Amino acid sequence: MPVVKLFVGFVDSLNEWIGRIFGMIIIPIVLIAVYEVICRRFLNSPTIWSFEVLKQLFGLYFMMLAAYGLLHKAHISIDVFTMRLSKKKRAIIDIICYIIFYFPFCLITIKYSYVFAAVSWVSKERSWSVFGPVLYPIKTVIFIGFTLLLLQGISEFIKDIYVVRSKEL
């Protein structure tokens, strides 16, 4: 199945690339947080923009790296139940969990995050804070992040099927 292999390779490469690029967002997050602490604590002059900017940057960081985390098995899992099982049995449990929990959750979240973002774009939604940044781009990131997470989940699901069948991908 070369198409399946191409899909898995494409999704894995895409999320690897996105993860490495968006992982760099941690640098401005740290710099802005340090700047705000210095301004607030030592100069007695807090900024009005840092909280909103940090909140949006961290949301971007978190959502865009979720699929990267799944690719590298960095998400929380309950290995205590499966650590003594064979690779094939773990793959079977993963397949069942993907079908029962993962895919429905991702699909529902994608559906509602699309509506959430669309309504925000139509109204040109802004934050209520004094700084008042726009919110529709970050709300769109929720939709994009879960779409990437779903694609990576499909890739992992396919890999598990190949493990169960004892075949190379």
Image (cartoon, helix red, strand yellow):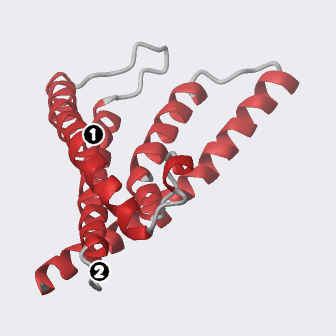
Q: Residues within 10 Å of mark 2 (few under 14, many from 20)?
A: few
Let me know if residue 76 appears in the view. no
Of marks 1 and 2, which one's residue comes earlier in the chain?
A: 1
27 to the left or right of 90: right
Let me know if residue 128 appears in the view. yes
Which residue is at a point 63% across and 53% down the rendered structure image?
A: 27
Which residue is at a point 58% across and 26% down the rendered structure image?
A: 51
Seen in the picture, residue 4 relative to 46 is either above or below; the reply is below
Badge 2 element? loop
Seen in the picture, residue 3 relative to 79 is either above or below; the reply is below
Point out residue 148 in the picture as x, y percentages from the top left corner: 28, 54
Q: Quadrant of the N terminus?
A: bottom left
| Residue under numbered circle 2 | 166
Point out residue 50 in the picture as x, y percentages from the top left corner: 60, 29
**Residue lying farthest to the right in this orientation:** 42
Pick the front one: 90 or 9: 90
| Residue under numbered circle 1 | 101
The residue under label 2 is which amino acid type? Answer: Ser
Q: Residues within 10 Å of mark 1 (few under 14, many from 20)?
A: few
Badge 1 element? helix
C-beta proximity under 8 Å, tags 1 and 2: no
